[in-house]
């Protein structure tokens, strides 16, 4: 299989993949269903990757011995209510081990020191359950934001979770406005020393506290709009949220990336303050090696 002249990958045709070189065509199970030109269909089969589409994102399952998955991403990542499509705030390759990045959420002390949040409390005990790791934090205002944003009394409850060490995510609920933000991090090691980072986030306004008279106005307006206009309005609102929130996430992520790129792994770290879950997290990580 190759790429076509425009550098694109193989072409999708009627649910099958066509190689641009000889036009051999393979179905979703990897079986060759069309030969080259007028040649007979060869008895050929290629390996297929197990995939899952969640929130418009394509997840590819990889097992070193090519075994099928025993779990699904959707068992764990299944946002309830109405959410925007995930928006990519950053992508880049860095000389960082994925575990160093995934450890971010259990290293709770750095939320105060590096990110300058004024409050970080563990709300629930961390739970390590097979390929899932959960904890809930209560995080306060961020001191290094511009003054007008710093003084907004927004406190969020963050449900940190990870599916393996390749997909840490945080479900943020900003109080008291009720805005919800899922912060998604995808870590793909591409060689011995480098990892590809994708930072995404999605927003939900379904629990935002809107004054009653405004809600009624909106319901009245919705009745007069057709679904295309409604979709365009939703898109514009989501885009506005991306514009406001993206710089904040990019800034926080850049602070972490700078540190992760230069830190060295300490096998037995001294636990500082609230960082007691690091040992539990590292014990949980061992199942992936
Ligand atoms: Fe961080």
Image (tube, helix red, strand yellow):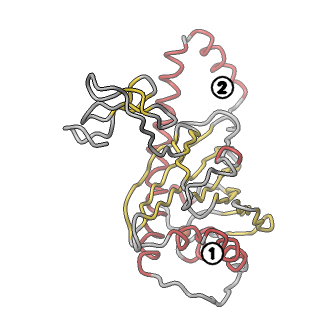
Residue name at image x 73 percent, y 69 percent: 121
Mark 2–mark 1 Cα distance, whole angstroms, equals 41 Å
Instruction: Report which residue position mark 2 lands on.
Output: 214
Describe the element under mark 2 as helix, strand or loop.
Answer: helix
Q: Position of residue 222 (x, y in %)?
A: 61, 15
Mark 1 residue's CB less than 8 Å from ligand 1:
yes
Mark 1 and mark 2 in contact (Cβ < 8 Å)?
no
Residue name at image x 65 percent, y 14 percent: 220
Instruction: Report which residue position mark 1 lands on.
Output: 107
Quadrant including the N terminus: top left
Residue name at image x 45 percent, y 64 percent: 189
Foreground of the two, 229 or 189: 189
Foreground of the two, 4 or 32: 32
* Callout 1 crowding tier (Cα within 10 Å): few <14, some 14–19, many ≥20: some
Q: Name the residue furthest left.
A: 5
Query: Would residue 283 be found to the left or right of residue 233 on screen?
Result: right
Q: Position of residue 211 (x, y in %)?
A: 70, 31
* Callout 2 crowding tier (Cα within 10 Å): few <14, some 14–19, many ≥20: few
Q: Position of residue 249 (x, y in %)?
A: 49, 56
Query: Would residue 276 be found to the left or right of residue 199 on screen?
Result: right
Residue name at image x 70 percent, y 59 percent: 132
Snapshot quadrant of residue 134: bottom right
């Amino acid at each position: 299989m190759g790429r076509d002249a425009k550098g694109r990958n193989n072409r999708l045709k009627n649910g099958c993949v066509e190689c641009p070189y000889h036009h051999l065509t393979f179905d979703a199970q990897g079986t060759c269903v069309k030969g080259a030109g007028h040649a007979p269909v060869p008895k050929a089969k290629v390996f297929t990757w197990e995939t899952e589409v969640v929130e418009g994102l394509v997840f590819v399952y990889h097992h070193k011995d090519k075994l099928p998955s025993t779990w699904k991403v959707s068992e764990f990542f299944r946002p309830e209510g109405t959410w925007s499509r995930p928006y990519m705030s950053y992508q880049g390759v860095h000389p960082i081990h994925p575990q160093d990045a995934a450890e971010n959420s259990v290293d709770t002390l750095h939320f105060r020191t590096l990110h300058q949040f004024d409050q970080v409390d563990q709300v629930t005990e961390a739970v390590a359950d097979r390929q899932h790791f959960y904890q809930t934090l209560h995080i306060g205002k961020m001191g290094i934001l511009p003054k007008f944003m710093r003084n907004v009394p927004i406190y969020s409850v963050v449900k940190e979770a990870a599916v393996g060490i390749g997909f840490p995510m945080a479900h943020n609920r900003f109080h008291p406005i009720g805005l919800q933000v899922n912060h998604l991090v995808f870590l793909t090691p591409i060689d011995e020393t480098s990892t590809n980072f994708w930072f995404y986030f999605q927003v939900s306004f379904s629990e935002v506290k809107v004054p009653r008279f405004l809600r009624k106005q909106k319901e009245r307006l919705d009745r007069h709009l057709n679904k295309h206009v409604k979709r365009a309005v939703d898109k514009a609102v989501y885009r506005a949220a991306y514009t406001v929130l993206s710089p904040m996430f990019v800034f926080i992520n850049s602070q972490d990336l700078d540190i992760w790129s230069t830190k060295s792994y300490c096998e037995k770290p001294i636990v500082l303050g609230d960082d007691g879950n690091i040992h539990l997290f590292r014990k949980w990580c061992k199942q992936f090696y």
